[in-house]
Amino acid sequence: MTRPQSRPPRGPAPQRPSMGPTRPATLVVAALAAAALAWLLISSFYRDIPPLPWLPPVTVTGLAVLEAYAAVTTRARIERKPGRDPVDPLVVARFVVLAKASSLAGSIFAGFYAGVTAWLFIERTRAASEDLPAAGAGLLASLALVAAALWLERSCRVPKRPDEDREEPDRAG
């Protein structure tokens, strides 16, 4: 007994999941939503929270520095500069995932700190003026993390080969 051969399904081929570069619009929307939420929370509960700590801005700055370092070393390894070992493709894939996650997290933190900083700037109390430096540092650290993450993501791209820049004679037209 023979089995009937199955036909491929009709219609468009199913799309496979793919990962593209981080879209700036995604980061902006996340930051704006976080800023609005931060403004709402800080205006409602500022009296009930302790002074803003300095540890989060320091930690986020450390992450930004590490990702910037990874961007520099990964780009050099992808370009196979002298004295650098070739890079493992799986490591590059992990760095891309890290960069995408960090850019989104950094934009959420930046939005949150922007909302808090703006509210503290408008508020004219002694406690608000004492919290303003930590909030400003958090905003700057978060922006640095977004920049470092986008740099790392860009550094993980495979460079074009010189022969890819030239058009083939039979395809020119």
Image (tube, helix red, strand yellow):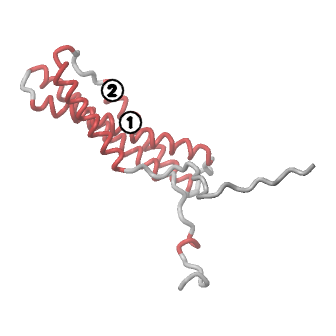
Residue 47 percent location from the top left of the image: 16, 15
Q: Is residue 94 left or right of residue 8?
A: left
Label 2: which residue?
56
Instruction: Identify the residue at horizontal 52%, vertical 43% (top origin).
Output: 95
Among the 4 quarters of the image, the one containing residue 56: top left
Residue nearer the viewer, 34 or 76: 34
Give the residue type that dot 1 points to. Ala
Judged from the image, the secondary structure of the residue bearing numbered disc 1 is: helix
Outermost right residue: 1
Residue nearer the viewer, 117 or 129: 117
Give the residue type that dot 2 points to. Pro
Residue 128's place in the image compared with 92, above or below, is above
Residue 52's place in the image compared with 114, above or below, is above
Judged from the image, the secondary structure of the residue bearing numbered disc 2 is: helix
Among the 4 quarters of the image, the one containing residue 10: bottom right
Query: Is there CB contact under 8 Å for labels 1 and 2?
Result: no
Residue 101 percent location from the top left of the image: 44, 39
Label 1: which residue?
105
Q: Is residue 122 left or right of residue 74?
A: left
Instruction: Identify the residue at horizontal 24%, vertical 22% (top origin).
Output: 52
Residue 116 percent location from the top left of the image: 21, 30
Compute the Cα span from label 1 to label 2. Answer: 13 Å
Q: Nearer the viewer, mark 1 or mark 2?
A: 1
Q: Please rate how many residues cluster around mark 2, counting C-alpha atoms within 10 Å: few if below 14, some from 14 to 19, many from 20.
A: some
